[in-house]
Amino acid sequence: MHTPTPSSARRHDLAEPVTHGTAPNDALVLEQNGSKGAPPSRRHVLLTLVLGGWLAPLARANPAATATPVQLALFWPHARSPQGFLVSEKLDGVRAVWDGQVLRFRSGRAIAAPSWFLLALPQVALDGELWIGRGTFDRLSGVVRQSEPDDTAWREVKYLVFDAPGHVAPFAERVRFVATALAQANLPWLLPVAQLEVKDARALQALLHSTVQQGGEGLMLHRADALWRPGRSDALYKLKSELDEEGLVVGHQSGKGRLAGMTGALLLQMPSGQRFALGSGLSDALRREPPPVGAWVTYRFRDRTPSGLPRFASFLRVREAE
């Protein structure tokens, strides 16, 4: 773990940690070791946009309330310059939103974390990822989705925070706010996600390549001047060597030949409403007991056809119920 050190914000050919001012709490350089539920109602979204930071105390007053909607990422346009954005590693963890009292999945369901983990969190709204390390998603998922927390297993879990949704300020200022709040907490498992400035599109691709070579999943790009708002917008993008998205299982196609008697493909409905058959990447075990209709699955793909369907799509995982 590298200790944060202050410096003046600047740009270099690849990536330079973004820091602001000279106080140690302003430094944002922290490298990690190892390195949807129901959509919100229109009324809820409008309240979020208008009230901003008032939502955090409202959630604290009613822990059973639906969680504040999260920001979701668009796909980064090829060859676009990253100037004006802050770049971080895309962590293959479990999204967790803290409202000051309750830690929740994206769906709004409370996460059964140990009391020592929750009591140490600051009394401000946070958004981040529960994470153990690169390539450990399945193990992490098994730990954080238990109805009764395994105290020993939770000792491996970090909460890596990348935003403060209740803080009404541009993203770059929210980054400083998170760094200060977490520095005051001074816990080895509660860390801000490192945010970098990257010079140009070529340097961005080099950073992506380096991240993937080290076992990372990809990159996230936050527009530095953007205020927080829920849903997908031009404020947040993701960049990966392979694209991915989630689809709703709406049916199963029977297998043929060797796959007779098993599922040959899942019939998926994309976020756009289009449907396609996904057969690549399914293990024989999944073909014998496929994800049921109504389940959400994640699939990878290289690009899209002119009509918007994914090319060379391959099954990745079932999204766990939350």
Image (cartoon, grey):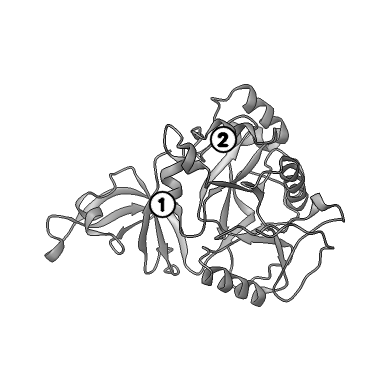
Camera-nearest label, 1 or 2: 1
- From the viewer's perspective, is 35 left or right of 259? right
Which of these two is toward me, 176 or 236? 176
Which residue position holds label 1?
A: 138
Q: Give SS at disc 1.
A: helix
- From the viewer's perspective, is 320 left or right of 35? left
Q: Give SS at disc 2.
A: strand
Res 234 → quadrant? bottom right
Quadrant (top left/top right/bottom left/bottom right) for the N terminus:
bottom right
What type is the residue that disc 1 sits on? Asp
CA–CA distance between discs 1 and 2? Answer: 20 Å
What label does residue 10 carry, if any? none
Return the residue found at the far top: 61
Q: Position of residue 128 (x, y in %)?
A: 60, 46
Which of these two is toward me, 102 or 58? 102
Mark 1, Cα crowd under 10 Å, few <14 / some 14-19 / many 20+, is: few
Mark 2, Cα crowd under 10 Å, few <14 / some 14-19 / many 20+, is: many
User: Measuring 60% from the left and 74% from the top, which residue is drawn there?
Assistant: 205
Return the residue found at the far right: 22
Quadrant (top left/top right/bottom left/bottom right) for the C terminus:
top left
Kindly indicate whether the residue at mark 2 contacts the one at mark 1 (C-beta within 8 angstroms): no
Mark 1 or mark 2: name the one nearer the start of the chain: 2
What type is the residue that disc 2 sits on? Leu
Residue 204 visible, this orientation: yes
Q: Is residue 80 above or below residue 29?
A: below
Q: Position of residue 271 (x, y in %)?
A: 44, 51
Q: Position of residue 47 (x, y in %)?
A: 65, 32
Q: Position of residue 242 (x, y in %)?
A: 47, 67
Which residue position holds label 2?
A: 103
